[in-house]
Image (cartoon, helix red, strand yellow):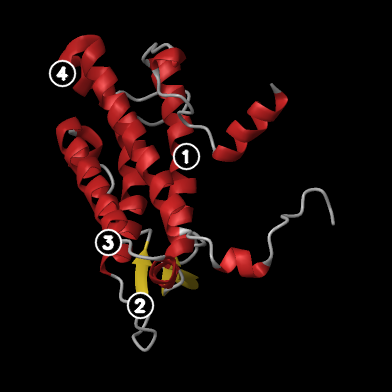
Amino acid sequence: MHPLQPSHSSADTAMTNVLHPLIKSNLGILSQKLALLDLLVARNGAKQASIDFQTMCPIVGASIGQHFRHSMDHIELAALVASSNSTDSTLPPRALHYDLRVRGGTLEKDMIESRKRIIGVIDIFQSLRTRSIDIDGDNALTSSSVTSYFNLTADSNKEIGLPSTIGRELGFVAHHAIHHMALVKIIATKTLDIDERELPNGFGKAPSTILFDQHQA
């Protein structure tokens, strides 16, 4: 067996609850968002924090608010579909339209509304965790079919639908958000002069990067 090949069998994999790590990953990202908002207020007060939230970073070309709004659009959509999804395979797959987004709105500029949105999505994930009963039920949810729609080219406004599952999309939105948090980290440290040590551990780092760094230490 190759040393990097997992030692577990397909039967072991089938018994692995994938919903719990998906929830944990998304909740971790959402908690980091709240921690940064709290830090902005703690540093300079609510008024300046609101300004900092909207400040454009010349390196990234965007603000914390814009990156929060974009990544929240994806996380919220997947969470809502997961929370309302039926495991009845006879029903048509639910649809996720990731590129139908409101840009430049209140959620990019109003830190209070952004916080409310984050807390609301945290509640959805916590509800999913509370509803978790057993591995079979959780895996039935994560393997439920959905169709994910994207604009894949700029020469047409037609969305392309890709077959997927609830679990795959919950993983995608977490992975997608990590990259936005990495850019938020640049804004925080380079434009707002926040010391990186003030940020939560692992802020803007993918789990694979953290594991790699630990292995190199």
Q: Position of residue 145 (x, y in %)?
A: 43, 75
Q: In front: 21, or 108?
A: 21
Q: Residue at x 58, y 32 (%)?
A: 210
Q: Are marks 3 and 4 in contact (CB under 8 Å)?
A: no
Q: Position of residue 128 (x, y in %)?
A: 29, 58
User: Between marks 1 and 2, how big is the CA–CA gap?
Assistant: 29 Å
Q: Position of residue 181 (x, y in %)?
A: 43, 34
Query: In the structure shown, which secondary structural element does the residue marked by tag 4 occupy?
Result: helix
Q: Earlier in the sequence, mark 3 or mark 2?
A: 2
Q: In this rendering, does residue 100 appear at all?
A: no
Residue 29: name its quadrant.
top left
Q: Are marks 4 and 1 in contact (CB under 8 Å)?
A: no
Residue at the spot of label 1: 178
At label 4, counting other C-alpha atoms closer than 10 Å, the crowd grade (few under 14, some 14-19, many 20 or more) is some
Residue at the spot of label 3: 131
Q: Nearer the viewer, mark 3 or mark 4?
A: 3
Q: Earlier in the sequence, mark 4 or mark 2?
A: 4
Residue at the spot of label 2: 87
Question: Hey, what amino acid is under mark 3?
Answer: Arg
Mark on residue 160?
none
Q: Is residue 63 above or below residue 99?
A: above
Question: Hey, what amino acid is under mark 1?
Answer: Ile
Q: Is residue 105 above or below residue 150?
A: above
Residue at the spot of label 4: 46
Q: Nearer the viewer, mark 1 or mark 2?
A: 2
Q: Is residue 217 above or below residue 159?
A: above
Q: In front: 186, or 164?
A: 164
